[in-house]
Image: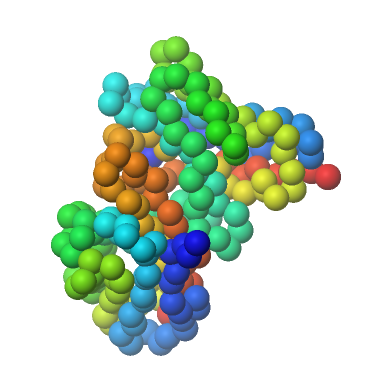
Amino acid sequence: DAKTTQPPSMDCAEGRAANLPCNHSTISGNEYVYWYRQIHSQGPQYIIHGLKNNETNEMASLIITEDRKSSTLILPHATLRDTAVYYCIVRVYRDDKIIFGKGTRLHILP
Amino acid sequence: GAGVSQTPSNKVTEKGKYVELRCDPISGHTALYWYRQSLGQGPEFLIYFQGTGAADDSGLPNDRFFAVRPEGSVSTLKIQRTERGDSAVYLCASSAGGFTDTQYFGPGTRLTVL
């Protein structure tokens, strides 16, 4: 079973920052937080991952709380193309499989 | 560059028939994964190959499902005696292994069993 809890859906206005929360209260010390997204009719796409420090790349930022029991994915300037299901996953680095939950369906509103 | 490709993109078959789904991973990727995604659900792990061998097949639902990767590149997922419950999108992913393990997914094969 997935070890994360995410809201089933969220709305965000185009051009604003989208903040997607994720709870992972049972995360272990050797587990990383990964985010993937899945645009309609496509395979999942890797976004970002982190262990305990905040991370940023060209797609997004990942903020992990100090106790590591929750995290937030931030899309700084959401566009209509960011409409997708976003999956928050915890896994041991280089584990052989990803256990997906149901994710958050993000709607970007024009 | 070329990503993960899967063929066919759509497959319609009748209950009881045999199907093969193909995955071409990114060139040089040693690890290959198969997932299955039912409508409204997240992808579900089926099997993982490291090179030619199946390192973890714990997600295969029963013995009707089998996968091979004979030369460590292309993989084929084989389903015997298909059932209507096998209808889903079958996703393939590959990763380079080593110190980076990002899994890159293909577009999937939509299987419909009538």
Among the 4 quarters of the image, the one containing residue B73: bottom left
Residue A90 in the image: above or below residue B72: above
Residue B87 in the image: above or below residue A22: below
* Residue A6 in the figure: left or right of residue A79: left
Q: Which one is nearer the viewer's eye here, B101 or B8?
A: B101
Residue B19 position within the rendered picture, expressed as x and y whole percent measured from the top left: 34, 82
Residue A102 in the image: above or below residue B15: above
Viewer can see residue A91: yes
Viewer can see residue B33: no
Quadrant including the C terminus of chain A: top right
Residue B77 position within the rendered picture, expressed as x and y whole percent measured from the top left: 30, 72
Residue B76 position within the rendered picture, expressed as x and y whole percent measured from the top left: 30, 74
Q: Residue at x 59, y 37 (%)?
A: A58
Marker count (numbered): 0
* Residue A4 in the figure: left or right of residue B99: right
Residue A66 position within the rendered picture, expressed as x and y whole percent measured from the top left: 44, 12
Among the 4 quarters of the image, the one containing residue A39: bottom right
Quadrant including the N terminus of chain A: top left
Furthest residue in direction top, as rendered: A66
Q: Residue at x 76, y 32 (%)?
A: A16
